[in-house]
Image (cartoon, helix red, strand yellow):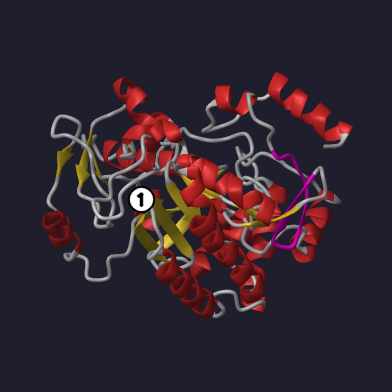
Amino acid sequence: MNPGTEKLISLDKEYLWHPFTQMKAWLASEPVIIESGDGFCLIDTEGNRYIDGVSSLWCNVHGHRVKKIDDAIKGQLDKIAHSTLLGLAQTKSIELAEKLVAIAPKNLKKVFYSDSGATSVEIALKIAYQYYHNQGQKRDKFIALGQSYHGDTIGSVSVGGIELFHSIFKPMLFETYFAPTPFPYRFNGSAEQCRQFSLDKIEELLKKNPENIPDIMCLAKGITGGYLPLAATLTTQELFDAFLGEPSEFKTFFHGHTYTGNALACAAAIASLELFQENKIIESLTAKIDLIADYLKKISLLDYVGDVRQCGLMAGIEIVKDKKTKESFPYEKLIGAKLCAAMQPKGAMMRPLSDVIVLMPPVAIDLPLLRQLLDIVYDTIKTDLPKIVK
């Protein structure tokens, strides 16, 4: 390890508090420090390269140092980096809003910007609540899917169902009715922890609108290609109109962020949307999805592998103590974290959710590099996992 890396690790441990990280374990470790990126790879301060197997926490779309997005941000810097949308308008936020509405479900007409998925959900909840309040109605209960995750602000936690992450904040949350998740995840909530709705009843309500188009839609994560924080909450014209009134009526939506509609972020998002068309990203996904599915079939046969789940380019590989009974390892053994750490020397950067190995490569990744990533995942589970669990 070079002296520069050693110094950075020391400074990190002295000053930083990392998210979703048990800092006692972190302080005892020798963490990887990323210095740069190249295409779909991360490069650390020692010059080691890692395939970005989780899209830098599920937001990097086109890779790192993408010329079109780099140029868009640099070009915007020559004009202005940021100006407020409170009482002012700004060119890039307008241009992006037009593009988002053009590709969104047809009834969504208005765009409210924020800076993360959690804040976009927070905004959606507040819009829904105030929409009825402005019409003189009191509606303050929400229905959400169990085992869901929408971010870490108080509102988004209130409609989330991950006990492991959020149970400590329960006294701060508003009441939510949880419906059983339709996905194949085990639900551990007790009757006291949540009141569940029948999915049949929810589907019955949805069928009253044959097209099932949303009144509110939240966008974040990869909206800028993974470059800058940006989110958008899209609503219908009807919802927007309910906030129109005289100043004395106090129908204004009193919510905002300092960096709402940031010009640099909006410029990056516009370039990212253009890259989707230019590089035919959506059309390229089928072959990648099929390749992942092929590898998951092989992985599912390995020892200590429980449920294997896939939705498009996203996959979860559950590591279990007993393959037949699906018994989990004790949480404190940190099997998932150790397994992902074993992939790093082989050139893959992965991240677990407890003992579920999350696979979510950048959607624009090329097939040879995706195959290389999947080879590392398969080999590590087959070869290293038996040693890790003993």
Q: Amino acid at mark 1?
A: Leu
Local SS, label 1: helix
Please state which of residues 154 and 378 is positioned toward the viewer in this rendering.
378
Q: Quadrant of residue 184?
A: bottom left
> In the rendered image, is residue 247 in sight?
no
Q: Which residues are magenta?
A: 32-44
Between 387 and 139, the residue placed more toward the observer is 387
Which residue is at a point 23% across and 44% down the rendered structure image?
A: 187
Q: Is residue 54 visible?
A: yes
Position of residue 16 measured from the top left corner of the image (x, y, whole percent) = 67, 25
Image location (x, y in percent) of residue 171: 30, 20
Question: 13 left or right of 314?
Answer: right
Q: Which residue is mark 1?
A: 239
| Residue 287, magenta (yes or no) | no
Residue 188 lies in quadrant: top left
**Residue in the picture at 82% in, 44% down:** 46
In-front residue for pair 51/1: 1
